[in-house]
Image: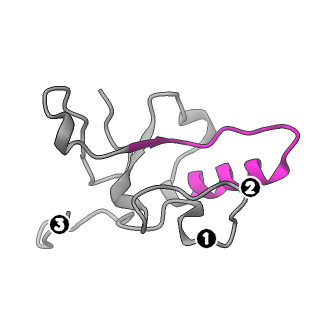
Amino acid sequence: MAVCCVVGCGRKYKRNDKDNNPKFYSIPIVNPYDPLTQLRRNEWLKRLNLSESSVTPKIKVCCAHFESGGPSYHLMKKDVDWAPNKNLEPQSKGEAVAQ
């Protein structure tokens, strides 16, 4: 089961509700022949407040954390969705969560 790693998000993939499930994305992997992939991974980790050692294949980010609903192509560094950018701060108890 996929669960969003963003603190305070809590979105999950429900096996029995495939039509209403959010999309989930993995932390980008590094291609040793493309230095841009390391920059992108570092930016994701920074924005998600994760350390390199905490990343596992099960760590996912849901579509609620991208303006367009998903990450942009890795070569589009200036695109707003090059890394997660939306709803990254934990919600306070008094705030309504817009989802």
Residue 31 lies, in percent from the top left, at 78, 38
Instruction: Point out the tag, 1 or 2, that comes first from the N-terminus.
Output: 2
Is residue 63 located in the magenta-colored stretch of the structure?
Answer: no
Type of residue at label 3? Val
Residue 46 lies, in percent from the top left, at 58, 57
Residue 16's tag is: none
Residue beneath the point at 84% across and 50% down: 35
Residue 39's tag is: 2
- Viewer-side label of 1, 2: 1
At label 1, counting other C-alpha atoms closer than 10 Å, the crowd grade (few under 14, some 14-19, many 20 or more) is: few
Residue beneath the point at 52% across and 56% down: 71
Front one among 62 and 56: 62
Quadrant assignment, res 16: top left
Residue 20 lies, in percent from the top left, at 18, 44
Residue 51 lies, in percent from the top left, at 58, 44
**Disc 3 target residue:** 97
**Disc 1 target residue:** 79
Residue positioned most to the front: 19
Type of residue at label 2? Leu
Instruction: Point out the tag, 1 or 3, that comes first from the N-terminus.
Output: 1
Residue positioned most to the right: 33
What's the magenta region?
A: 24-46
Front one among 87 and 99: 99
Residue 74 appears left or right of 70: right
| As drawn, 86 above or below 18 | below
Residue beneath the point at 33% across and 58% down: 64
Q: Identify the element where label 1 is drawn.
A: loop
| As drawn, 21 above or below 57 | below
Type of residue at label 1? Asp
Residue 83 appears left or right of 32: left
Residue 57 appears left or right of 15: right
Is residue 26 located in the magenta-colored stretch of the structure?
Answer: yes
